[in-house]
Amino acid sequence: MSTNEYSTLIDILEEPVLILNLEGNIVSFNNAAIKYFLLRDKSSCVNLNDLVLEKANVLTQNLTMWSRSKSALPAGLTFKLKRDEIRKFVCKGQLIRPSTPSLEALIMVRCITKRESHKTFISLNKKIEHLAKEVKERQRNEKYIGQLNFELEIKVNERTKELSTTNDSLNLSLEKLKNTQNHLIRSERLAALGSMVAGIAHEINNPVGVCVTAASYQQDQVNHYRQLYDGDKLTRDDFESFLDLTQQSSKIVSSNLERAADLIRNFKLLAVDQTEDISREIKVKSYIEEVLLSLQPYFTKTQHSYEFNCSAEVHLYSYPGAITQILNNLIENSILHGFAGKKRGVITMDVDSDDSDLILDYSDNGNGISDENSKRIFDPFFTTRRNQGGSGLGMSIVYNLVKDKLFGEIKLLERKRQGISFRITLPLSIKNYLEDGSHSDSN
C-alpha cells in the first residue's frame, strides 16, 4: 500500500490517529486528529508535550514503559482538548483509549524502528483494508444507484410526458363534457318550457272560452233588444233585463280576462326564469303552485294527482328557474317510471323551513327503485328504460342543479313504504354564496 493510499484511508477513519516516536514527536496524524486536538496541519511537527498536562520526564517514562508492554498499564495521559476540555486516557496494549467509554477513541501507534512499525501496523492495516473494501463496495453501490437514478429519471420524464399528454386529453374531454352537460341542461330547460306552454295554453283556453261565449251571448242579446227598440216594443222591464244581462256578462268577461292575464303573467315569469337564469326572491307556495299549473298536461290525460303542502310565509332567494326544472324532472320521472303500469299515482310535496334552510320532501307511491339501482340513481346516463327512450339524464341534472346551482343537498331516503322519497335541502338565501364568488352561471 502506497503512502498516499495509506494517508487517504486513515483520513477516512472517524477515530483520531497519532503516530509518534519515543521522544514524543508526532510524526503523522489523520484529519480526525486535527479536529480533535485543534492541530494546525499535517506539515507541522507536533510533540506530545504540547497536548498533555504531564511533565516531559513523566511522558518519556510512560512512552518507554508502553513500548515494552502489550498489556494494559495503570499509567495514563491527560489531554488538553479544544474549548479548555480535559480528558483522561489510559494505555491498553497498542492503544490509548479514553478512561470514560462514552468519549471518542484515540489510537496512538508506537513506531520505534521501521521493522517494528511494520509489525505494529498489521492490525491497523487490516482495519484499513477492510475499510477500503467497504469504500469500494460503497462506490460500486453508489455507481449502481446513480445508474438506477439516471434510468429512473428518464422513465419519470417519459411517464411525466405521457401523464401530461393524458392530462391534456382528459382536460379536453372534461371541457367537452361540460359543454355537453350545459347543452343538455339547456335542452331540458327548453323541454320544460314546452311543457309550460302546453299547460298554460290549456289553462288559458278555459277563461278565454268563457269570455268568447259570454261576449257572443251578450252580442245576441244586444241584437234582440235592438230590434225591440227599433220596433218601438222595448218596455221598461226589457230595458232593466238588458242592463242586468250586460252587467253580468261584463263581470264574467272581466273576471275571466283577469284570470287569463294572471296566467300569462305567471307564464312570463316562469319563462324568464327558465331562459335568463336570474336569481330573485319568491314566495315558495305561490311559485310552486304556478309551476304545478304549468305542468298540468302531465296529469290531464291520466288519473294521477298531486298533493302540495307549504306555508304561505316561506320566502326563498334563489334561482327559480332551477327549481322549476327540478320539479319538472322529478314529476316527469314519477309519471314515466314510478307510475308505469299504475292507474292512480299520487305525488306528495311537503315544504318546511328553519332559520337557514328550506326542506322539500318529495315522494310518490309508485313502483319504487331497487337497492342496487338506488346507488346509481344520480349517475349520468343511468336509466332502467333504455330501450324505451330513457336518456338517464333527468336525475343527474336534478342532482347537479341542487348541488352546484342552488348550493343545496339532495338525498334518496330509505323506503318506509311503497314508492320513492327524496329530501332536498336548500339555503333560504344564496346571496352569501354569490358574494363569495363561488357560483358560476355556466349552467
Image: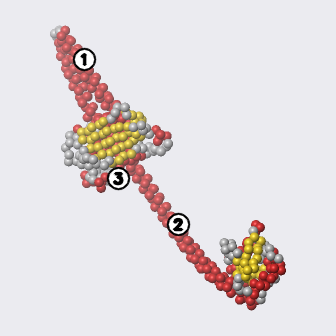
Quadrant of the frame with the C terminus: top left
Mark 1 → mark 2, Cα distance in angstroms: 90 Å
Q: How many marks?
A: 3
> Which residue matches tag 1?
247
Crowding at mark 1 (Cα within 10 Å: few <14, some 14-19, many 20+): few
Is residue 8 visible in the rendered structure shown here? Answer: no
Question: Residue at horizontal 74%, vertical 90%?
Answer: 115
> Which residue matches tag 2?
157
Is residue 304 visible in the rendered structure shown here? Answer: yes
Q: Is residue 154 left or right of residue 378?
A: right
**314 in relation to 111, above or below:** above
The mark that comes first in sequence, 3 or 2, is: 2
The local secondary structure at tag 3 comes to: loop
Crowding at mark 3 (Cα within 10 Å: few <14, some 14-19, many 20+): some
Q: Do the residues labelled 1 and 2 touch (CB within 8 Å)?
A: no
Q: Label 3 is placed on what type of residue?
A: Asp
> Which residue matches tag 3?
379
Report the mark closest to the observer, 1 or 3. Answer: 3
Q: Farthest front residue?
A: 74
Q: Label 2 is placed on what type of residue?
A: Asn
The image quadrant of residue 270 is: top left
The image quadrant of residue 118 is: bottom right
Q: Are marks 3 and 2 in contact (CB under 8 Å)?
A: no
Question: Residue at horizontal 28%, vertical 24%?
Answer: 255
Q: Farthest bottom residue?
A: 115
**408 in relation to 241, above or below:** below
Mark 1 → mark 3, Cα distance in angstroms: 60 Å
The local secondary structure at tag 1 comes to: helix
Q: Label 1 is placed on what type of residue?
A: Gln
Rendered location of residue 110, percent (x, y): 75, 84
Rendered location of residue 25, percent (x, y): 80, 80
Crowding at mark 2 (Cα within 10 Å: few <14, some 14-19, many 20+): few
